[in-house]
Image (cartoon, helix red, strand yellow):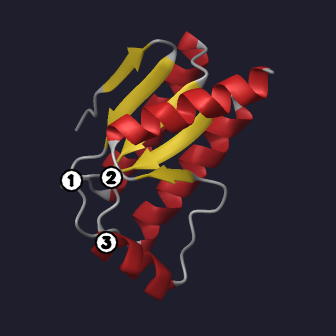
Amino acid sequence: MKVAILKLRGILLTSIPIDMNDEDAMAFQADVLRMLSDTEATGLVIDITAMNVVDSYMARVINDTAVQAGMLGAQVVLCGMQPDVALTLIEMGRELIGVETALNLDQAFNRLETMIEEREA
């Protein structure tokens, strides 16, 4: 499965689909990092609105992708987390360390633009 990664004003936007398996997750991570490197984007928004359930592997992939994107110089915001997903992550003891979050895509873009401006100042 190929996950769409769009570039808008120097920011990459991607949405994780509901039916992503472990192989798809690794391909997604590689594609995001490759596109960050190729486009020199300064930000990344990962939208997980479609996900009603997140297992520990997917939580790790999301966290690792955010950390690796940061190593490539991009600011990262995760948006669209459902309440059940947040509860599950807490119950599993999985924290999204160093990952900024936002309720929706609009807030994610606003937060990301602020983060980029602060870094450039």
Q: CA distance from mark 3 to mark 1?
A: 12 Å
Quick check: 52 above or below 11? below
| Pointer 2 with pointer 3, Cβ within 8 A | no
Amino acid found under the numbered disc labelled 2: Gly
> Which residue is under mark 2?
80
Q: Earlier in the sequence, mark 3 or mark 1?
A: 1
Q: Are marks 2 and 1 in contact (CB under 8 Å)?
A: yes
Report the side of 90 relative to 85 (left or right). right
Calculate the distance from the C-alpha at mark 2 to the C-alpha at mark 3. 9 Å
Which amino acid does the dot numbered 1 rest on? Ala
User: Looking at the image, which residue is at 65% across and 34% down?
Assistant: 115
Residue that mark 1 sits on? 50
- The residue depicted at 53 percent of the width and 38 percent of the height is 111
List the residue tagged with mark 3: 83
Q: Is residue 95 above or below residue 113?
A: below
Mark 1 lies on a secondary structure that is: loop
